[in-house]
Image (cartoon, rainbow, N blue to C red):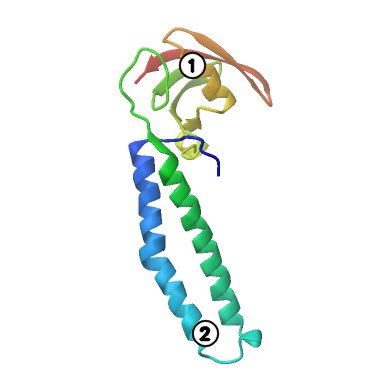
Amino acid sequence: MDSKKIYLTKEGLEELKREHEELTKVKRPEILNRVSAARNMGDLSENAEYTVAREELSFIDGRIDELDELLKQAVIISNNHSNTIKLGSTVKVNTNDGKEVFTLVGEWEADPKERKISHESPLGKALLGKKVGQKVEVEAPAGKIVYTIEAIN
């Protein structure tokens, strides 16, 4: 991974720390026990349990490495109230289809179902730095969508 900053809310950072702890203190030791038990069953060339356990261990080790890098590069975003939109802002917008509320987060926390959008997405980029009353236009598959900013928290 490069040394790019990973922007996370405090909650997002805690979630990644919980996942890291679960993998290192619970799941990895469980898999190591399975590998050891499977190794003791005899011929490794025909031992499916050993092969599966080694693959799971490799996957978990890869995720632990990824989380280690993410946690090193993490920068906490605060949602201090501001009159301009920034990372951590919750924004109420109005479109032709009605009102919507989004929270601007870093790419690792983005989750459209939770209305969390990345600051690197087209809408996120358009909203950054804007104020209440301003309009932004974003290209979407269905055409241009105009968002009018109504509130910033």
Res 96 quadrant in image: top right
Tell me how far mark 1 sits from mark 2, CA to CA. 59 Å
Quadrant of the image occupied by residue 10: top left
Q: Residue furthest top?
A: 133
Q: Of the residues shown, which amino acid type is indicated by label 2? A: Ala
Vertical order, 46 against 73 (above or below):
below
Disc 2 crowd, CA 10 A, few/some/many (<14, 14-19, 20+): many
Given residues 44 and 115, the one toward you in this image is 44
10 Å neighbourhood of mark 1: few (<14), some, or many (≥20)?
A: some
Question: Quick one: which residue is furthest to the front in this view?
Answer: 3
SS category of the residue bearing label 1: strand
Looking at the rendered structure, the secondary structure element under dot 2 is: helix
Q: Which tag, 1 or 2, sits closer to the chain's start?
A: 2
Which residue is depicted at the point 36% across and 65% down?
Answer: 25
Residues at discs 1 and 2 in contact (Cβ within 8 Å) = no
In the rendered image, residue 103, in percent from the top left (x then y), is placed at 43, 28
**Relative to the observer, which residue lies in front, 148 or 79?**
79
**Which residue is disc 1 drawn over?**
94
Q: Which x, y percent locates residue 90?
A: 39, 24
- Amino acid type, callout 1: Asn
Q: Describe residue 19's horizontal placement relative to residue 1 as left or right.
A: left
Give residue 122's quadrant in the image: top right
Q: Which quadrant would the C terminus be assigned to in this image?
A: top left
Q: Which residue is mark 2?
A: 38
Q: Nearer the viewer, residue 70 or 142?
A: 70
User: Is residue 129 left or right of 11 when viewed as pictured?
Assistant: right
x, y (%) of residue 145?
Answer: 60, 17
Residue at the left extreme? 80
How many labels were placed on the picture?
Answer: 2
Instruction: Give the quadrant of the N terminus.
Output: top right
